[in-house]
Amino acid sequence: MLSQHELLKRIMEINKDPSLSDAEKASARQDLMSGKWKASEEDKETAKADDKAKAAAGEEKDSSLLDDDTLKCAICFDLCVRPVTAPCQHNFCLKCFQVRPARRSKKACPSCRHEFGAKFAANPRINTALTVAIRAFKAGDARAASKPFVRINNDDRPDEAFTTERAQRAGRANAASGRIMVNIPNDHFGPIPPEADPRGTGIKVGEYWKDRLDCRQWGAHFPHVAGIAGQSNVGAQSVVLSGGYEDDRDEGEWFLYTGSGGRDLSGNKRTNKEQSFDQVFESMNKALKLSCTKGLPVRVVRSYKEKRSSYAPTEETPVRYDGIYRIVKCWRTKGKQGYLVCRYLFVRCDNEPASWSSDETGDRPGLETSLPKEATEEMRKADKGQVVSMSDKPWWDWDEEKQAWGWARDPPISQKTAGGASGKQGARKKVSEQEKALREFACGICKNVPTEPVSTPCGHNFCMPCLEKKFGGIADEIDAGAATGRSLRVRKVLKPCPTCKVDICDFLKTAQANREMTAVIAKLQAAVERARLEAKAEAEEGEEGEHGSVPAWQPGCTASRRRPCFCCSRGPVCLREHACLCP
DNA sequence: GGGCCCGCAGGG
DNA sequence: CCCTGCGGGCCC
């Protein structure tokens, strides 16, 4: 890996290289920052010599870099805060740029008088490579700099599944397919931890992918078209800011997000800019609302397709992970198209600094209480005056002791069987949980789960056969009692609930196995069985020959449904052929 | 750059 | 099963 000094030197060399175009410069910088660059022998030599010189000269060399314009704002002459880079290669703080050159009629660089292109003047984008350099510079050593991650080659994978001939010709499936690299269920909340990542790093803020499909494979956001990942009764795990809704407003640390729906998608359309009816808090919008009230962590991914945000990535880093946010408020209001839209105020709460931040630390609490005026103004106009707030005890919260964000309550349990770090621990846990649920139905006499369950008015469960055995031919005796009209009272005393001793004689007259309960029990039993199998597979994991009778995957399989492998959870498994892709 | 079409995942 | 979905390739 490059020393920090070397890194900065290289960035400057790139910036000064007259043979490179702006785009090439940007791309070279990005490659450097993302760790794609590989040390050649020559480079290693210079690095060595460099280290020696550095050792001799102490830190002088590093501090001398402060004289270089590269990291400084050409307006305020300080280190850039949220740097934007003009086509002339001069850098500015986003704010400095917005208050000075952007407001003037002649939009030109105050440093070199070079006129900005219309695109840059209208929507300057943060130069994230520069923020990394500034952070590194401030920290003075490589350790504190956000560590460049090494992307493992995602191409040429045996399981980069092609589904259609057309897609094969294009060199890539045109819909979601391919192996999910991270070991987490789709309904995993919060950051993707190192344990779940085959590289052992976890998904870091600033990591980026070439498209939504790639992003999906690394678990940051699973749906490949939809912008919201979630379940209406659990919450939302992640969102993408992709410019699909014109009401969105992005200010980096906070943004206003629009819910989904309200659009006519008839005729096999996937999206439609035109809204034709009101949005409601249902399905994905409801999931987001739940994440809001619970204060759950929501992963946020930004796409270069968002054209109106300075915080959106560029084509060089098309789909970028920006860390954890919480939804502090949500409400409904009239959107620009005149229909009601669901609105969500996201506020960042991540331990890592944002890609656009020149700070060395992540977010600090407080932002969620001092709401931006854009949001408060909109909330005042909220539909029916209803504004939903985040809980006082959010699931994801600031830990004063650790001085870090983290889980303040247990994370929601995954409902999926996708395996993975949490899923694996969950399998055994799930067995015991469901067994516990089953025990709720246990017969008060034989203590087993009843096959013909009866629930008494006093709320206790028994097997029908156990009750009959206990009270001896219930139906017959009662019939006999009714026929004689004599000893019913006596029998009543003789038929107390075996659990609570309450008289259940009258109930027993008409008692029948509860069909509804039978169904519930059957479902639970099936779930326990499934969970047991999972736990078993888990226990046997690592052993050879686990795939048993599963046939080898055949290239060109056009299965429409894929799931992580039942055996090793690494997937995908073709459910039509039940073929397994495990190595 | 716009329109069109497509496969697929996932919720309900 | 049906419907939705802030993709992406391709053709024009």
Image (cartoon, coloured by chain):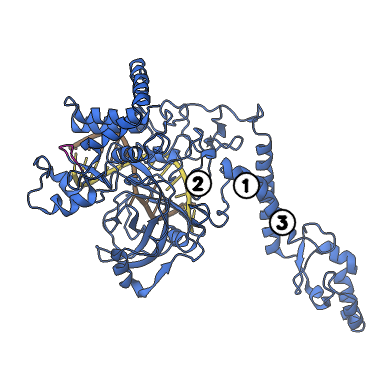
Chain colours: A blue, B yellow, C brown
Q: State the quadrant of the N terminus of chain A.
A: top left
Mark 1 belongs to chain: A
Q: Is residue A487 left or right of residue A528?
A: right
Membership of A89 in magenta stretch: yes
Q: Amino acid at mark 2?
A: Asn
Q: Amino acid at mark 3?
A: Lys
Location of residue A451 with respect to A223 vertically, above or below: below
Q: Which residues are magenta?
A: A87-91
Q: Work out whether residue A116 can be spotted.
A: yes
Disc number placed over residue A426 in the picture, else none:
1
Same subunit: marks 1 and 3: yes
Mark 1 Cα within 10 Å, few/some/many (few <14, many 20+)? many
User: Element type at marker 1?
Assistant: helix
Among numbered discs 2 and 3, the one appearing first in the sequence: 2
- For label 3, the crowd category at 10 Å Cα-Cα, with few meaning under 14, some 14 to 19 and many 20 or more, is few
C-alpha gap between disc 2 and disc 3: 25 Å
Q: Residue beneath label 3, please?
A: A436
- Out of A170 and A166, give the one closest to the viewer: A170
Earlier residue among tags 2 and 1 = 2
| Viewer-nearest of discs 2 and 1 | 1
Residue at the spot 14% in from the left edge and 52% down from the top edge = A100
Question: How far is the residue under mark 2 from the one under mark 1?
Answer: 14 Å
Residue at 34% x, 32% y is A59
Amino acid type, callout 1: Gly
Q: Position of residue A528 (x, y in %)?
A: 69, 49
Tell me the distance, in whole angstroms, between the alpha carbons under discs 1 and 3.
15 Å
Say which residue label 2 marks. Answer: A186
